[in-house]
Amino acid sequence: MQEASHLVIDARDLVKIYQMGTVQVCALCGVSLQVERGEMLAIMGASGSGKSTLLNILGCLDTPTSGQYYLEGLAVADMDDDQLAYIRRCKIGFVFQNFNLLPRIDALGNVELPLIYSGLSARKRRELALAALEAVGLADRMHHRPSELSGGQQQRVAIARAIVNQPAIILADEPTGNLDSHSGEEIMNIFRQLNAERGITIILVTHEHHIARYARRIVRIADGRIVDDQPVSETSYVIAAT
């Protein structure tokens, strides 16, 4: 393992237990995961395996029952609410399966939302939002509302919203789950481009093998435990890009 300074994520022995009536359910049962800056990583697992729970903890949307989580070398458990809010707003970009766009606002307005509390002028916010839409090839649709966009276009808007604050990390939960195969490939190529050109660390959850192969490393999780952690072979990686 390389020096800790190269790690953007260092999760150690994470346990997450949910109380379901009188029964305790262990969603994560001692998961350790290290992710280096600039990696593109896929987490695979069946429904209920714990992969989304892990992603929520990595994104500071949830807290573990026990274990330690260090984000860019800082202990997340020691952060107060303001620090956590800053992390979620500026350090991490989130992309979800259902896009989570506001239906009455056009694409430009949706991308601008994370900048509302930044203290930037309205002109600067619009400038940054437009640049983010340009980065995902959707500047020509900036005044379209979500209902006027295809699923693939809506997900591109969601990615633009995730990168508008120039985060170090993007966490994507089943980002191609609601898309056809062609749109899914377009989305994964955008992620790959952001990773290669901007050095953004990308962690995506998927249950689709052909989507996971767009990453450079695949972590498999089952019953709340990591059961496999392997680099993607160069052959598989190249095939996924074609």
Image (spheres, rainbow, N blue to C red):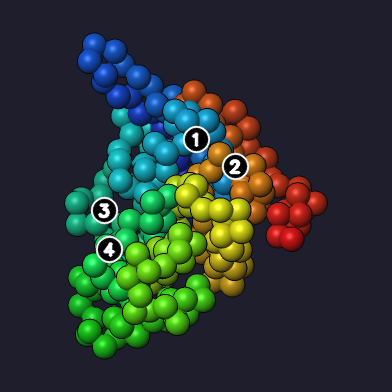
Q: Nearer the viewer, mark 1 or mark 2?
A: 2
Structural distance between the alpha carbons of marks 4 and 1: 38 Å
Q: Is residue 189 left or right of residue 238?
A: left
Q: Residue 86 bears which disc, if any?
A: none
> Which residue corresponds to the image point at 38% horizontal and 51% vertical from the top-left?
98
Residue 54 drawn above or below residue 166: above
Asked whether residue 214 appears in the rendered view, the answer is: yes
Q: Residues within 10 Å of mark 4 (few under 14, many from 20)?
A: few
Residue 140 location, quadrant: bottom left
Q: Nearer the viewer, mark 3 or mark 2?
A: 2
Mark 2, secondary structure of its residue: loop
Q: Residue at x 35, y 85 (%)?
A: 127
- Left or right: 209 in relation to 75: right
Percent x, y for residue 111?
Answer: 34, 71
Sooner in the amino-acid sequence: mark 1 or mark 2: 1
Q: Earlier in the sequence, mark 4 or mark 1?
A: 1
Give, as a three-letter code, the residue at label 1: Ser
The residues tagged by marks 4 and 2 sit, at their Cα atoms, a distance apart of 28 Å
* Front in this rendered view, residue 172 or 187: 187
In this view, 18 is above or below 163: above
Q: Which residue is mark 1?
A: 32
Q: Position of residue 95 (x, y in %)?
A: 41, 56
Q: Residues within 10 Å of mark 1 (few under 14, many from 20)?
A: some
User: On the image, numbered disc 4 is attached to which residue?
Assistant: 103
| Residue type beneath disc 2 | Glu
First of labels 4, 3 by sequence position: 3
Give the residue pinned by disc 2.
208
Q: Are marks 4 and 1 in contact (CB under 8 Å)?
A: no
Which residue is labeled 3 in the image? 84
Can I make out residue 4 in this image? no
Mark toward the start of the polypeptide (3 vs 2): 3
Q: Nearer the viewer, mark 4 or mark 1?
A: 4
